[in-house]
Image (spheres, helix red, strand yellow):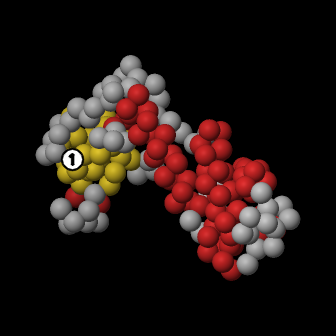
Amino acid sequence: MENSTITNRPTWGEEMKKDLAKIVGKLVNEWCQNETSLEECIESSEKVLEYNSNDNGYELAKEFEDEGFSPDSELVEILDCVSYEKSKVQEAFIKKWVADNNLKLELSIGQRVVANFVRKGQFECEIVKLYPETMQYGLWYESIGYEKGKGHAIVNFESIVSII
């Protein structure tokens, strides 16, 4: 709808995977008290995270075991943060994309819009919050399950279909 000449929103890809592997590699390196080099921990993290970046800590620890580590409950607990770290990496790329393209939200709080929700369809909504750093709107609609002012759904600006 708006900002139609910009590049697409960043999606999970190789650069993001490498950044996540550096974060996880550092955590694993600290856990093993530098018995394995940071570079080796990052390399192992890249292999483990290739297909498992959203798994829980236990599943990831089993993958690190396949890489020659001897995981314990402490490592499982450390690795439970991987999905959170993944979301932070992706958010950083999106914030950079917003800044690099000088993007600005064009709609304001109180405006009514029709938005497309993945797997739910389209709903008439009211904008209740702006997230300019990630080019997203906080939307409230009657069947969302929250009282107005108590919660909202966050959608990318690209999901706005029309203004009412």
Residue 111 appears left or right of 30: left
The residue lying toward the viewer, choosing from 56 and 114, is 56
Q: Is residue 153 left or right of residue 67?
A: left
If the image is split into quadrants, where does the N terminus sit? top left
Question: Residue 122, position in %: x, y?
Answer: 34, 44
Residue carrying label 1:
127
- The spot of residue 46 in percent (x, y) is 73, 50
Residue placed at 13% from the left, 46% from the top?
110
Residue 58 appears in which quarter of the rendering? bottom right
Task: Judge from the rendering whether residue 40 lies leftward or rightward of residue 140; answer left or right.
Answer: right
Instruction: Give left or right: position of 13 versus 136.
Output: right
Query: Can residue 143 be seen by looking at this rendering?
Result: no
Q: Residue at x 22, y 58 (%)?
A: 142
Please identify the residue farthest to the front as the structure is shown: 34
Residue occupying the point 45% across, 46% down: 91
The single residue placed furthest to the left in the displayed view is 110
Q: How many marks?
A: 1
Image point 18% across, 62% down: which residue? 149
Q: Is residue 105 above or below residue 6?
A: below
User: How many residues crowd around disc 1 within 10 Å: few (fewer than 14), some, or many (20 or more)?
Assistant: many
Residue 26: where, in percent of width, then height?
65, 58
Check the image and name the residue furthest to the bottom.
Answer: 73
Label 1 sits on a secondary structure element that is strand
The answer to whether one can see residue 62 in this image is yes
| Along the line of sight, the residue nearer the viewer: 48 or 75 | 75
Check the picture and name the quadrant holding the C terminus. Answer: top left
Q: Position of residue 96 (x, y in %)?
A: 43, 36
Occupied quadrant, residue 162: top left
Amino acid at the residue labelled 1: Ile
